[in-house]
Image (cartoon, grey):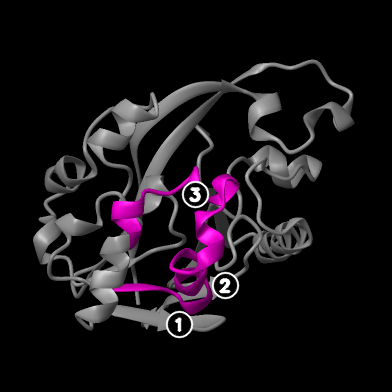
Amino acid sequence: MDYEVLAVRYGTRRTTKSEVFLNYPVFGEPDASIEMDYFFWVIRNDERTVVIDTGFSEEAATRRNRTMLESPVSALARLGIAADTVSQVVVTHAHYDHIGGLPEFSAAEVIMSRREYEFWTGPMARRPLFAALTDERELDHLVSLQDSGRLRLTGSSHTVAPGVEIVEVGGHTPGQLIVKVTSGESTTVLAADALHYYEELDRDRPFAVVCDVPDMYRAFDLLRDLSSDSRTTLVAGHDPA
C-alpha cells in the first residue's frame, strides 16, 4: 500500500529554549531564541485520505499570539482536499493546536485514544496547568462527537487503515499518539508532540509541557528504536527542520 505523507505548516512563533525545554537550566547552557512551527499531516493515496490533527483556530491564534500563516482548511483546499469530505481524522492529543479545526471535518470519523479522551473530559483537565493548553469549547466538541457516535476511542494501538497504525505513548499528554505509515518498504513515523524538536531526542531533553516525564523518556526510546532503521523517516511535531 503506497501513501503520500505530507507535513503541512500552517503557523509559527518565536520563543526561547528555556520556555520549550523542561528545567532548561539543568543543561548549563545559555538561553537562546528558537522557532516553533505548527503542522498538521495528511496521509493519502488513490483510495483514502487520512488527516492527522486539525491545527488551531483563528481565535486561538489571536488570543495566544500565534502567527497563522494559512488556515488548515485553506491549506487542505490547495492540496485538492475539502475538509467536509475527509472520512477519517486522527487526533494525536487534545491540545488547542491539534483539535481547533475539528468542527470543519463534518463527515469524518474522529479517532483518538480512550485514555486521552477520558482525561480531558474528566475533573483533572480543569486544573490550571492542564487547562492552559486546551479550549473548553473544543473539549465540549469532542464530547458531542462521542454522543453522536462519530468518535472512535482506541486502546494502546489501532489500525486506522491498511498501513496506517496509531500507537499510544503518553508523556506529553496521558494518551499522546504517534502514527506509523508503511508505504512499500519504507516507514514514516509522525511523532506529533511525542517529539516537538529533534533536539529532544538528540540530547535527551524533555519538552516543557509534560504530563508524565518517565513516559516521555520511554517515548523517546521508542522513537529512537523505530528510527534506527534506515528505511524509516521520523517527523517531529513542531521542528522547523
Residue 83 visible within the image = yes
Is 41 situated left or right of 109 in this image?
right
Q: Position of residue 147 (x, y in %)?
A: 24, 80
Rendered-image quadrant of the N terminus: bottom left
Is 131 situated left or right of 222 in this image?
left
Can residue 21 be found in the magenta stretch?
no
Upstream in the sequence, badge 2 or badge 1? Answer: 1
- CA distance for labels 3 and 1: 23 Å
Callout 1 amino acid: Thr
Vertically, is 20 above or below 103?
above
Residue receiving disc 3: 131
Q: Position of residue 232 (x, y in %)?
A: 58, 61
- Number of disc labels: 3
Vertically, is 2 above or below 128?
below
- CA distance for labels 2 and 3: 21 Å
Is 59 situated left or right of 155 in this image?
left
Local packing at callout 1 (Cα closer than 10 Å; few below 14, some 14-19, many 20+) is: some
In the structure shown, which secondary structural element does the residue marked by tag 2 occupy? Answer: strand
Local packing at callout 2 (Cα closer than 10 Å; few below 14, some 14-19, many 20+) is: many
Upstream in the sequence, badge 2 or badge 3? Answer: 3
Upstream in the sequence, badge 3 or badge 1? Answer: 3
Q: Position of residue 189 (x, y in %)?
A: 53, 61
Residue receiving disc 1: 154
Residue receiving disc 2: 168
What's drawn in magenta, residue-wise?
A: 110-139
Q: Position of residue 219 (x, y in %)?
A: 69, 62
Residue 187 visible within the image = no
* Residue drawn at the location 58% of the way across and 59% of the way down: 173
Asked if labels 1 and 2 touch by Cβ distance under 8 angstroms, the answer is yes
Callout 3 amino acid: Ala
Camera-nearest residue between 229 and 141: 141
Is 241 situated left or right of 214 in this image?
left
